[in-house]
Amino acid sequence: MSYIMALDAGTTSNRCILFNEQGEMCSVAQKEFTQYFPQPGWVEHDANEIWSTQIEVAQRAMANIGATAADIAAIGITNQRETTIVWDRKTGEPVCRAIVWQCRRTSAYCDELKEKGLVEEFRGKTGLVIDAYFSGTKLRWILENVPGVRARAERGELLFGTVETWLIWKLTGRHVTDFANASRTMLFDIHRLCWDEELCGILGVPTAMLPAPVPNSTVYGTVQPGIPGLESLAGTPVCGAAGDQQSALFGQTCFAPGEAKNTYGTGCFTLMNVGGKPVRSRAGLLTSVAWQVD
């Protein structure tokens, strides 16, 4: 029996699900991790705890049904979107706790950007409104407020990523992000499918710390040897990633324009497939990349 290992990095817990060749769920393991609320409106996670919890549920999901590494055909990742992590390129150590998508600490800075008349600049390229929800201003906050981080970033010593980027890097050593997650950063041009240097300049983000944008279904790399707890999975391909809401749209088979889904988790989200080209909402809704499959 061959299984696909799906790593679901959620906002309050991590899960691992093993699917068989018929797409049936054969094993599930889940574990919550710590939520930090250092100030009103601030929400943080420990990126190392996200990683260790993900390892633990992967081990448990395999043990539940006696699956071995030889049974795992490939690994895919779905994740809480927008949560922002910065870590050292050599040591892998995060420079601070991850700033979670719910965190509102950059609201005042977002208001400043709006007052400067930059709403259309960001919306036209990214499909997003200027809001503390997205990763870009969270990343700027880390660069401006964690001692020494900006200088280290400008020297090329630090990497940025959302949660799927962090997990792929920990698993494979590659620094990549899928198009769906990249489109939720407020730094990504959804028309050209690349980082926008002008927007990065406005937010003061060194482009050297950004991951390479890649399709949602392609081989990102293989599990590195010697990962504690995952030693047996060395060589297993990691070949799929998508933000949780986009992956839910795909999972609900909303493949045709006009098809939509609603999901209920930490938040409630409605997404609709609008087709192969971005469509701008006349009602203030957001436009993001759903997926690109090789």
Image: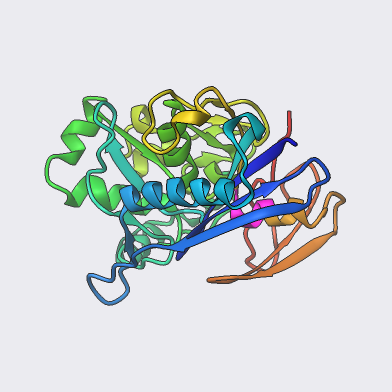
Q: Is residue 173 magenta?
A: no
Span of residues in magenta:
243-247
* Residue 285 vs residue 86, the one in the foreground: 86
Q: Residue furthest front?
A: 66
Give the residue at x 55% y 48%: 63
Colouring chosen for the image of the structure: rainbow
Q: Is residue 88 above or below residue 283?
A: above
Q: Residue furthest bottom?
A: 40
Q: Is residue 246 magenta?
A: yes
The image quadrant that residue 20 belongs to is top right
The quadrant the N terminus occupies is top right
The quadrant the C terminus occupies is top right
* Residue 44 vs residue 142, the one in the foreground: 44
* Residue 214 vs residue 23, the one in the foreground: 23
- Left-right relation of 230 to 94: right
For the stretch drawn in magenta, what is the main secondary structure?
helix
Q: Residue furthest left?
A: 147
Give the residue at x 30% y 55%: 46
- Left-right relation of 14 to 139: right
Q: Is residue 45 visible?
A: yes
Residue 78: horizontal and vertical position, in percent?
A: 58, 49
Q: Is residue 212 visible?
A: no
Residue 73: horizontal and vertical position, in percent?
A: 67, 31
Residue 27: horizontal and vertical position, in percent?
A: 65, 54
